[in-house]
Amino acid sequence: MPRFLISLCVFAASAAILVLEIVAGRILAPYVGVSLQTFSGIIGTILAALAVGAWVGGRVADERDPVALLGPTLIVGGVLAIASPALVYVLGPSASGESPAVILLLATVGFFLPAAVLAAVTPLAAKITLRNLDTTGSVVGSLSAIGTAGALFGTFVTGFILIAAMPSQPITWATGGILLVLGLVATVGKRAIIGTGAVFLVAVLGSAVLAAPCDVETAYSCAVIADRQVEGRESVKALILDRFVNSVVDTEDPTYLSSRYARVLVAAVQAQFPDGPTRALYVGGGGFTLPRFYQATAGSEAVVLEIDTVLPKIAVERLGLVPGPWLTILEGDARIGVRKVASTRFDLVVGDAFSGRAVPWHLTTREFVSDLVSLLTDDGLYVINVIDHPPLRFVKAELATLAAVFPHVAVIAPANYLSGERGGNFVLVGSNRDIDAASIASLVPANEFVLADADAHGWAGDAVTLTDDFAPADQLLSRP
């Protein structure tokens, strides 16, 4: 077998493993969310597969003809890569949740076998290449370098190009197809060609039947746009991201606020700005519910920081957003986006980038809040939506973080939320001027309670202040 072909097989197998590892995060997200735990589970599963595959591959290479095994190993790995999303789609709906056990289960079912099989390629290639013990070091070293180069190629191409260019399933199909072709080249015989072609078609068709649970798969989420039945309204739609309702909007009435937290947030802003803010900055766009609301009710200008470039398109095409001079959308990470508007001052900054399954920890820290404070007018407000459940460690830590930056803070939630009996959406407020808790209380529903300043500090207790150096948001957050 030509040395170039052996090297190409190692390169492709290593690249494919990293493609699957990165795509796994996207495929598992609708069922287990996007968190440090998710990626830890995926990385751990792939590392375990690499260990098992390398060990088994080495044993088999010593016992059987590695030349005869190299091509079939690539073919089996390719078929398993094609099937990996389908396996997750079958099991995911009945095994969703954020617990480590569920994450490891889905990662193992979807990606352990293909990674393990492909990890066996390198020891098979080493056995084929070795001629005598005098060249063991150079052979193993060169194959290790080639495998690392393939892994780097798979990482960069997937993370920088493929995830943003196409859904996950076609990525796995293309990866599996390349492995199958390479496996055929390494396998001699018409039967192998015909059989592999048939297996490829069956695997792709079978995987396609179990379609991804998304209307639109973005680089960051699985998006579903669903109709909502609301009495007296015919045009209400919900934007669901990774199986969690992100926004509910009336496409024909931008003043409609469906969610409790949105109404509470608006009440908190109204107590300080009865006529609404003149200019507002939104950390997170989602369904653009609040930017539409304030543009319709107060003629407010809006700057929206949105990392997911597909969500603004969904909002325009499916959720009734009408762009205009009033709206500026800055695509990219909010930590970078705030620097682009450093010379602008806002009456209101709304933090709404957290969901029930994903918390971008770098948007929770004292340093980020300090960046936002520098953008506010003297009487400006930072209002943030935080989702947490008992024992409420994350929301209390976030309130403590706001209190480390703002002289005045408040938390608004129902009594049974504040007592720790239940959880859900909490609205936190930070301001450089006094917060009129009585005015807010008069504007929110009767079951909502406002704790401001000393009361808010007392409620947060000795909660940790989140910083860029220490912000264990995923570990603090509790989910139902």
Image (cartoon, rainbow, N blue to C red):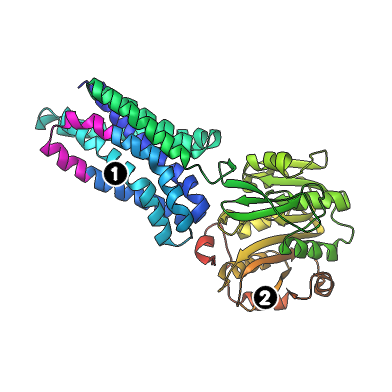
Nearest the camera: 226 or 304? 226
**Residue picked out by circle 1:** 116
Q: In the picture shown, does residue 329 fall above or below 438?
A: above
| Residue placed under numbered mark 2 in the picture | 457
Residue that appears at 73% across and 70% down:
410
The stretch in magenta equals 55-74
Q: Position of residue 411 (x, y in %)?
A: 70, 70
Can residue 21 be seen? no
Give the residue drawn at x 31%, y 28%: 196
Depth-wise, is mark 2 or mark 1 nearer the camera? 1
Quadrant containing the N terminus in the rendered view: top left
> What's under tag 1, amino acid-wise?
Ala
Q: Main secondary structure of the magenta part?
A: helix
Q: Residue 431 at x, y = what percent? A: 76, 64
Residue 70 is a magenta residue = yes
Q: Dot 1: within a 10 Å radius of its alpha carbon, few (fewer than 14), some, or many (20 or more) residues?
A: many
Left or right: 242 as drawn, with respect to 350: left
Percent x, y for residue 314? 68, 41
Choose top left, top right, bottom left or bottom right for residue 150: top left
